[in-house]
Image (tube, grey):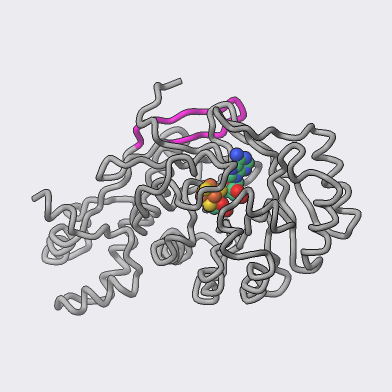
Amino acid sequence: MKTKDKTRPLLMGLPLAELSNLLNQNGKRPYVADQIFDWVYKKDLLCPLKWANIAKDVREWVETNFRLDLPSVSWKGVSRDGTQKFLLEMKDAQTVEAVVIAAPHRLTLCLSTQVGCAMGCTFCHTATQGLTRHLEAGEIVGQFIAVQRELSAQDDSARLTHIVYMGMGEPLHNFEAVKKATGLFLEAKGLGLGQRRITLSTSGLVPQIEKLSDFPPINIAISLHGARDDIRSKLMPIGRRYDLQRLFKAVRTIPLKAHRHITYEYLLIKELNDGRKDIEALADLLPRKSSKVNLIPFNEYPGTPFRRPSRERIAWFQDELCRKGLTCTIRRTKGDDILAACGQLKTSVRRPHSQ
Ligand code: SAH
Ligand code: SF4
């Protein structure tokens, strides 16, 4: 039974069209896929035997051929600012973290796409654990459903409204699974989020950026962190493989709808990339019309040699960039008291004690 369990795919990773094809190939009526989606994504009932309007043979077929398990919440913590962090355990006991950030009229879920990460950025806590494995599409979607359940249990009206792929992992390194999961988030008969409500952040995998025309048109954020090759490649090993010129050539191939832009995330690290020269380099590098800069004050974590610049320095950096005609925001740090802020996620400690 166990081997079979492992080989059965998760139903939650299956696009609607694929499910109807499979039903058709197995002598079932393809439109039943819509009804199955309704049970799974709208009614959140993951037990096929209870799907009242679906024929018994179809319910049994689903039971035999698919898994419908969700990641289980093995720990959760709430930050002083209300940010919630969930440690989610997959079927094989691997764990990832998901974070919920509340703002007026929005509830954003920061999702993981891999167990760990292979990219080795020197400022990132996740990088220190290396890559264990990719998540399957169904596990990515499963994080959403599992966290939504937790939130609904606290407050029946709470609804996740936005998704950012900014948890553990490099989403474009797990391209196909993230693409499938994104399709299910966007699918009106699935989770039904709008394109503008999903943001994918990448460290700059050039070949995959060049394939983004083959990806649903969601918001794209590029982790830049250095506007000069020497600094960027010191912070991000990927910068040695693809220099800034190569990266920007790829970025220009991203199809942008009218009035859309690319967000450039720029980590501010004390005395490393927070000087006037960096402002000049950023201003030279970024096209004004299609760029937004999001400054991320460095989040410290145990063992890192990097420090966050002072508040004044961060405000100065923003002002100077605005003066150069760039649209520029500062990301508010959320959840850092429970290591839930950007770059602080790490799951080598399997089960931290509850707060
Ligand atoms: N792997 C993807 C997405 C996850 S990280 C990426 O790198 O883009 C989400 C954002 O947090 C990235 O911009 C990342 O560079 C940033 N980040 C990583 N470590 C950080 C830290 N210690 N402090 C602040 N931001 C950090
Ligand atoms: Fe991976 Fe992103 Fe961390 Fe770099 S910053 S190691 S790409 S998760």
User: Which residue occupies the foreground of this view, 146 or 181?
Assistant: 181
User: Which residue occupies the foreground of this view, 338 or 189?
Assistant: 338
Farthest residue, direction left: 1
Instruction: Please name the residue shown 46% across and 37% down the image.
Output: 346
Instruction: Please name the residue shown 60% across and 65% down the image.
Output: 242
The quadrant holding residue 280 is bottom right
Instruction: Please name the residue shown 38% across and 56% down the image.
Output: 42
User: Which residue occupies the foreground of this view, 78 or 292?
Assistant: 292
In screen coordinates, is 189 left or right of 328? left
In screen coordinates, is 200 left or right of 287? left
Instruction: Please name the residue shown 36% across and 28% down the image.
Output: 351
Q: Is residue 171 above or below residue 207?
A: above
The quadrant holding residue 347 is top left
Farthest residue, direction right: 323
State the extent of the magenta-drawn residues as a range: 73-86
In screen coordinates, is 293 left or right of 352? right
Residue 259, horizontal then vertical, whole percent? 73, 70
The quadrant holding residue 174 is bottom left
In screen coordinates, is 50 left or right of 150? left
User: Is 85 one of the magenta-colored residues?
Assistant: yes
Mark yes or no: residue 348 visible.
Answer: yes
User: Is 96 one of the magenta-colored residues?
Assistant: no
Q: Is residue 237 above or below residue 30?
A: above
Q: Is residue 341 above or below residue 1?
A: above
Residue 245, horizontal then vertical, whole percent? 69, 69
Mark yes or no: residue 162 visible.
Answer: no
Q: Main secondary structure of the magenta part?
A: strand
